[in-house]
Image (tube, rainbow, N blue to C red):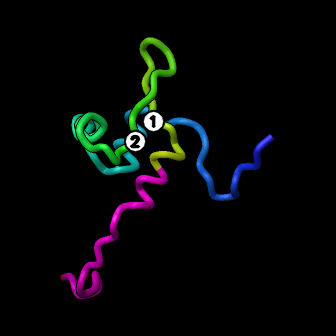
Amino acid sequence: MSEVKQNQVTGFYRLPKMCELLGLSKTTVWELSRHDPEFPKPVKLTAQCTAWVAAEVQQWIDSRERVQFKGSADNVC
């Protein structure tokens, strides 16, 4: 039996959760799935249920470059 790392995500994400996690629309999630070779591909769980492997999604999120903003939110009026 394999051990699950402490911070490793398991399970699946359905489309609404993908939109919430990524801050993207449903259409954008599907477009990335179809056209971006680095974006995780969905899997069919049943004939009418499609989801993304949570660990693959988290790995993709972790691989994304972080944007550093200049300034501080404290300076906003």
Residue 21 picture location, percent across and down: 40, 49
On the rendered structure, is 30 left or right of 18? left
Residue drawn 40% across and 41% down?
A: 40
In the image, residue 73 lies in the stretch drawn in magenta = yes
Judged from the image, the secondary structure of the residue bearing numbered disc 1 is strand
Residue 29 picture location, percent across and down: 29, 39
Quadrant location, the N terminus? top right
On the rendered structure, is 55 left or right of 29? right
Residue 66 picture location, percent across and down: 34, 70
Q: Earlier in the sequence, mark 1 or mark 2?
A: 2
Please tell me which residue lies in front, 47 or 35: 35
Q: Which residues are magenta?
A: 58-76
Please tell me which residue lies in front, 69 or 32: 32
Vertical placement of 21 versus 13: above or below?
below
Q: Are marks 1 and 2 in contact (CB under 8 Å)?
A: yes
Q: Which mark is residue 52?
A: 1
On the rendered structure, is 7 left or right of 43? right
Residue drawn 50% across and 38% down?
A: 53
Q: Which mark is residue 40?
A: 2
- Farthest right residue in view: 1
- Farthest top residue in view: 47
Q: Quadrant location of residue 73?
A: bottom left
Please tell me which residue lies in front, 48 or 37: 37
The label nearer to you, 1 versus 2, is 2
- Spatial CA distance of label 1 from label 2 is 7 Å
Please tell me which residue lies in front, 38 or 72: 38
Residue 19 picture location, percent across and down: 34, 42
On the rendered structure, is 28 left or right of 50? left
**In the image, what residue type sits under mark 2?**
Pro
**Badge 1 local density, few (<14 within 10 Å), some, or many (20+)?**
many
Q: Which mark is residue 64?
A: none
